[in-house]
Structure formats: structure tokens, C-alpha cells
Image (spheres, rainbow, N blue to C red):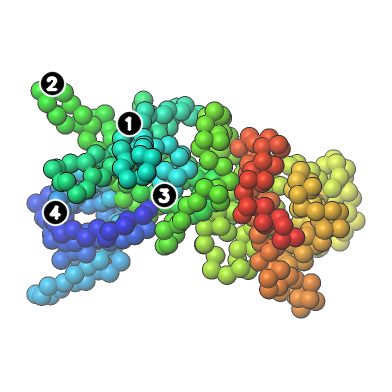
Amino acid sequence: MRIKEEYKKSGYFWLPDKSDKKIPGTLIISDGGSIELEVVGLFDDSIEALNGEDDLKRIIGHVEKDGLVTLVDCFYRNKSISFGGISKSLLHVNKVLSGVAYEQNEPVLFNTFSFSIEGLDEWIGISGISIAYTENYRAATISYSPQEEIVFQLDGGFKLHIYFGYTLPTGSSFTEAKITQKAYLKLSSEKEIELSTFIEVAYKITNLLCFAVDATVSLNNVSATSGTIIREVSEGKTRPVPIKIYYPSLPFSKDIPKIQSHTMLFTFGQIKGDIERILNNWFGAYDVIEPSLGLYFSATTGTHKYLDGKFLALVQGLETYHRRTSEEKLMDETVFRGLVAKMICLCPKDKRVWLKGRLLHGNEINLGKRIKRIIEPFKDLVGNSKERNKLIRNIVDTRNYLTHYNNNLQSKAVKGKDFWTLCQKMEAIFQLHFLKELGFTHEEINMVLKNNYKLEQKFNEI
């Protein structure tokens, strides 16, 4: 979660069932969503609490400017005990719900979950701002038309809304007039559901945008509403109270990404006529290839500091992807089981358990064949038969060396610039398969490749 300005606010904090004991403290939320609470004293200084575990499932607070807050799933990182003096303790906080105070076991349920993502405006490419210049460019007329909300139906009962917040010039300044527009996403559900479910769906949408813009982008400006938490705005009219939410969401990069249209795999405008199907295909892909998606994003979002780690994540991801999408075996399963039974029967009794373990995955095809199958749909992009075989051999030999560090394999492993190029190639193969999972046709994938210099360059490195 992107926090552009550090959140640091003082207030008083207490346990839901001990509102008579409030202690002073400071709530700190750093960029990335890391949350800490520094308090003076302890929430429970009884002998039982000092000797055992504190129940800090929820902490209620009242902080400057924001009012009531609920801190969720907390624990002491540093517990300081004072004997007559002033002591400070530090707590880790998993989530902050700002604007509400929940009881100890009160369910946290919402109907909507709103958020923005870095690069969302650039990806959507819709603006209500228009500028008209005179012929000599000495004068200009700037106007703004509010953009209509766009709504899509998702599987599972959700709706995804794209809406556009904006600000217009205010005051009576004669030297400046400013208009801004920012796109937001909102997930809505007719029935109230748990916050964790909304967070999971938002995570998948954020990963989709990471994939689409080919950059690591983060959530920001998260809020939620519930039909049961309302306030009166005028006589007889009520409105849900927006609850601001902070948590350490992924993906996250310390550096704010630079989003450029020419590096995107695809834009909203290119898929808007078929976006419901593409979104639901993406969610459906998580049900089948989630481990592979996780490994891909761990390799592309900077999780691995060294190229070795990135390569191993990519090769494991490709292997897992083929396992999840293919049932190919070396031979018919019935034939294989018969062979195993015969070999175990002929094996000395004291070695049968060992042999059975060695044969457990004996019908699996090897990594080289899996990579070959993965490349097959896009073999015309990877090169001729000789080049494809070399690519497969490099992947297998390098994986084997980095897994076993056998000196006999060291000379076969790819190193230096060729190692980086190999990772780029594997990343590109992943991207083509994910486009296929989204529902892009082979012709549409070729068009993406043709219009995306960054992706095309990964294949040209061969």
C-alpha cells in the first residue's frame, strides 16, 4: 500500500472490554502499509498478563483529526515494564480501520471496498478534461465534463465499478485554475461480506494491472462502507460512513513506478468491449494456476534481490504452470502401476519402502519436456528448432546446477549477460501464456507482441 506521507498521530488507546483504562500512544503508518503503535504503559499490567499472552485481537483508539480507530490483530514487538518510571512499548498492528470502533467479537463486514492503483489513470486512458487552443496558441479554453461510472459484473456476486473523482477550481484566484481527475475502483456486493474477501479480490485485480502495465504497482486510498454504519446528512437522509483502511498490501515497490503507454501489454481501451470475460478469466485462472502466478509475480516485482532467485522462481513457475494445465505422463497410468508393482515385488523386502519412494513420481515427464510443451504454442516466436532446443537445454542445465550445485554441472550453467537474457525469455513466455489464459486469441497475442517494444525485445535477445 502506497502511503505518500507518513501517518503519525497521537491519541489514547484501550481494549474494547476495558474502556476505563486508556493509555496514551502514537499510531504510525509507513509507506508500504507497515503499522506500529507506540504506547506509554501497558494495556494489561496484571501478573497474569505479564506471564502469559496478551489478547490484542483488537485495540480501540481515538487519534487526532481522524477520531475513532480500530486496530486489528496486534502483538507486542517490545514490551517495556516500568517500576515507578515511564516506559514505552511497541506493538505491531496488522490493519487499521479508521472512523469506527468495533467491539471485541463484532464481525467486520462491508458492502463496498474502494481503492485506487498506481497507473490506473494511464491504463484506463479516459479523461473529461479538454483543451482548445486558438490558431496562434496565445489563448486556450479548458473545460471539464464529469465522466460516467462504468460497471462490470464479476463471478461470485461482485460488481466492479470504475468511477472518476475530480476537483474544480475554487476561490477567487486570478492567477491559477486547477482541475484534477483521478480514477478509482470499487467492489460492491449486495450482501455484507468479510473484509478479507474484499482484500483478496483487490489483490488479484492489482496483480492483473501489474501484468497489464508490465510494472509493479501498489494500492492506495483504500476505504470501505457498510449498510449498517450510516450517518444522517440531512433530515431523513442517511449515507454510509466511509471507513479508511490501512494494511501492508502486496504487491509493493519502494520506488514509485513510471507508467508509460508504450510499455503496457494491453490497455483498458483495447479490452473494454470484452472486459467482463477477461476479468472473470483472470479470477478463474487463480483457481487453477495460483501457485504459478505467485511465482511469476515474485520474480517480476523485485522480491528476489539476486538473479539466481528470480531464475529459480521463473523456472519453478513454468514447471508448476504445466503441471496445473496438463495431465501428460510418460506412459498410461495403468501400465505404470503394473510396472511399479512388479519391481517392488522383485525388490528385497528391506528395500521396498525406499524403492516405492523413488518410484512415486516416476511417471512424471521431466522439466525439459515440460518447457518444450510450454514453448510449443509460441514456437514461431522463439526461433527455429535448433534455437528452441538450446533455450530448453540452457534452462534445464542452469536449474539443475542452481538446485544441486554439482561441480560437473557448473560449466553447463548459463552465466553473465546470457543469464539475464534467459530470465527475460522465460518472463516473456509466461506473459504470452497469461494472455492466453485471459482469453486473447493467437492473432491478438501477435498484435500485442507487435505493438509492445519491451516484450518484442525479450524475444529478439535470442
Please give the name of the residue rendered at 58% of the width and 49% of the height, measured from the top-left corner.
293
Of badges 3 and 1, nearer the viewer stands 1
**Badge 2 or badge 3: first in the primary sequence:** 3
Where is residue 241 shown, x and y percent of the image? 22, 35
Where is residue 365 shown, x and y percent of the image? 80, 51
**Badge 3 or badge 1: first in the primary sequence:** 3
Please give the name of the residue rendered at 46% of the width and 39% of the height, measured from the top-left corner.
124
Crowd tier of the residue under label 1, counting other residues whose Cα lies within 10 Å: few below 14, some 14–19, many 20 or above = few
Q: Is residue 423 left or right of residue 6?
A: right
Please give the name of the residue rendered at 41% of the width and 29% of the height, measured from the top-left corner.
150
**Badge 2 or badge 1: first in the primary sequence:** 1
CB within 8 Å, label 3 to label 1: no
**Badge 4 or badge 2: first in the primary sequence:** 4
Of badges 2 and 1, nearer the viewer stands 1
Q: Is residue 163 visible?
A: yes
Callout 3: SS: loop
| Alpha-carbon span between mark 1 and mark 4 | 37 Å
Amino acid type indicated by mark 1: Ser
Where is residue 1 shown, x and y percent of the image? 37, 53
Q: Which picture quadrant has residue 353?
A: bottom right
Where is residue 205 shown, x and y percent of the image? 47, 42
Name the residue beneath numbered marker 1: 145
Callout 4: SS: loop
Seen as rendered, the residue at the extreme front is 136
Name the residue beneath numbered marker 3: 118
Q: Taking 400 as reference, is 363 above or below it?
A: above
Name the residue beneath numbered marker 4: 64
